[in-house]
Amino acid sequence: MDPYFQYRKDIIDCCQWLCRHGYFGSLLSAGGNVSVRIPDEPVVVITPSGKPYMELVPENICVVDFNLNRIDSDLAPSIETAMHVGIYQNRADVGAVVHTHQAYASVFALINQPIPALFDEVALAIGETVDVVPYAFSGTPELVENVTRTVTNGCNCFIMQNHGALNLGQTLDAGWKNAELLEKTAQVYYHALTTGKPVTTLPAHDL
Ligand SMILES: [Zn+2]
């Protein structure tokens, strides 16, 4: 009996939905990565490096500890595993991390512009802002440092400069839904900005 089986299966379900809906930027590659923290243990269950999402089976999903030692993995874990661990170590409220290359959030990753809370549901689920994590190359300690410093604002979504998006949640379902909510918000905000007209934000007291 695999104690991590359900986590592995849930991660595959999430990744294949995100893949089919274009959240990893390309249907054929393996961009992005998704993890879940095991409650009360310094252990994460995370997608492997370089295997297309639509080909994943449960035993491909990696189990590693917070020191990045493999507990149960037949493939190499994502090169961003240290980034996921860094988030869990700095955000006790976070139980899942969904890192995507989703298109409209990536527009803001290129113009380096935070997205304010534009709708009530964004303020409630994501927080008062979607801030930009400064650029560093994928898989580097500099990126881990930039991410862990930025996520301490307590919000649940972030834009990664010239890279993609980070969506956090207490559960995998919450992180997954936040990815979709961020994309919808970024899409609407982008189109609103292109009108050239002033864009209204929520009154401060509603946040
Ligand atoms: Zn990425």
Image: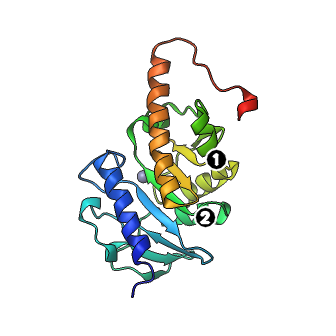
Q: Is residue 127 left or right of residue 104?
A: right
Residue 170 vertical position relative to residue 192 in the rendered view, above or below: below
Q: Amino acid at mark 1?
A: Cys
- Image disc number at residue 155: 1
Residue 59: x, y in percent?
A: 33, 77
Residue at 48%, 33% (x, y): give it. Answer: 186
Task: Please determine whether, in this image, residue 150 is positioned above or below residue 189.
Answer: below
Q: Residue furthest top?
A: 197
Residue sitting at x 39%, y 88%: 1
Q: For residue 15, which quarter of the picture? A: bottom left
**Residue 129, can we see it?**
yes
Q: Residues within 10 Å of mark 1 (few under 14, many from 20)?
A: many
Dot 2 corresponds to which residue? Answer: 88
Give whichever of discs 1 and 2 has the lower sequence position. 2
Compared across the picture, whether 170 is left or right of 108 comes to: right
Residue 191 found in image quarter: top left
User: Where does the image place residue 167, in percent across and percent down from the top left?
Assistant: 52, 50
User: Please, is residue 138 above or below residue 120 in the view?
Assistant: below
**Where residue 179 sits: x, y (%)?**
47, 46
